[in-house]
Image (tube, rainbow, N blue to C red):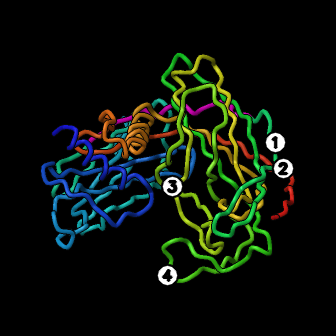
Amino acid sequence: MIQTKNIILLLGLIGLFCNCEREDRFYRPRVPQKLSALAIIDADDTLRYIRFEKTFQVEYPEDLTDSLRDLSFTISDSKGVIISFYSDGPLKSPYTYIIPDSIEFLSGETYFFRAKEKDCPEIYSEITAPEPPSGLALISLEREILRGFVNECHRTNISAWVDKFNITFHNDISGSSCFVVLIESYGAIPKEKWYWFRIEGDIMPRVLEVDLFDYYTRFSVMKSDAHGFISMFPGLSSYIMDPCNEYMLIEKPAPAYYIDGRKAQDKSIRIVLTNQSNNGVSVPTIPITYRIRLLSVSQEMYQFIKNLYTYERNLDDPFAEPVYFKGNVEGGYGVFAICRSIEINIEAPPPIWLHIE
């Protein structure tokens, strides 16, 4: 019974924490209705939001009100309340609140989060903001040609280029360091690629009026000095091109590399990352610059995402061990996380003009 209950809860939470909207909801008749909250706050960037949802208690979808009533929450520090929100009307669930950039979150300060909804008990969490990461540096950047891609829809052989990043950063081996790496590409769209296009779910196509495109890349990890895994980063989007329709971009959660610095042996961590362009699936841009972001995150956030990652990997294995799932939100579900981040901007190598054979 416990294993079944955990599976039901995880299905709903995966739907909440992937930034893609989901039309399906999950029936949880034996679990008391509770409030779920995902709060991701980067103190050094614009990624600052709290996403709320209630667990689903109605058997028939047509009876679902899909609303949050009398939702309220506060975030406070040792000096008092810094954010207060209350809605006396219904809000569509899930509801996302964007935290203003003007609100400061300081390393070493403990922050307290409370939220309440009319039909759910109060939820509570607290977190101490970590120190920002340090020492992020690029050791080398190489561009290679990779041949032999086969686009099955068009039956053509495609050559791509691969950018290989060798980076390093400091690790506090005496602390409880966990990190996240993201890569953002700022690229030019060749004039022959300016066209009407759709993002999956659009009713009408959009006109691509800009010749530059900014997006999080779907990179890979070749080598790492520390234990880690690639999973989605809640709240950020990436895109891929439909290999069967060059006019269709498909929105996906942005990938991120999660690192457990506690298991690294040295005071610095070195990672080799790769990003492919012009492979028939990536966004059709010529990278001009890259932005590599390094975030320091709490153990609770790292473990929370790792549990979701493990669960998704074992979905098709009926003999997999149950995943122990726990956030840091008491009285409900989710995680309250404050991150610190640094970044480096890297000029991309000159483009290698390739031929489609």
Marks 1/2: CA distance? 8 Å
Whether tag 1 and tag 2 are in contact, CB under 8 A, the answer is yes
Asked if residue 336 shows in the view, the reply is no
- Sequence-first disc among 1 and 3: 1
**Amino acid of disc 3:** Pro
**Which corner quadrant of the image does residue 149 belong to?**
bottom right
Q: Which mark is residue 142?
A: 1
Using the rendered view, name the quadrant where residue 331 is placed.
Answer: top left
Q: Are marks 2 and 4 in contact (CB under 8 Å)?
A: no
Q: Position of residue 40 (x, y in %)?
A: 44, 47
Residue on which the image places disc 4? 203
Label 4 and label 1: CA atoms lie apart by 40 Å
Left or right of 280, for residue 30: left
Crowd band around label 2 with a 10 angstrom C-alpha radius: few (<14), some (14–19), many (20+) = few
Q: Give above or below for 38 relative to 187.
A: above
Q: Amino acid at mark 4?
A: Ile
Question: Going from the N terminus, do you reach mark 3 or mark 4 first?
Answer: 4
Cα distance between the residues tagged 2 and 3: 27 Å
Left or right, 309 with respect to 31, comes to right
Local packing at callout 4 (Cα closer than 10 Å; few below 14, some 14-19, many 20+) is: few
Of the residues shown, which amino acid type is indicated by label 1?
Answer: Glu
The amino acid beneath tag 2 is Pro
**How would you rate the neighbour count of disc 1 (Cα within 10 Å): few for under 14, some for 14-19, many for 20 or more?**
few
**Which residue sits at x=64%, y=47%?**
219
Which residue, given by chain and number where applicable, does mark 2 sit on?
349
Q: Position of residue 19 (x, y in %)?
A: 45, 57
Q: Residues within 10 Å of mark 3 (few under 14, many from 20)?
A: many
- Mark closest to the chain's N terminus, 1 or 2: 1
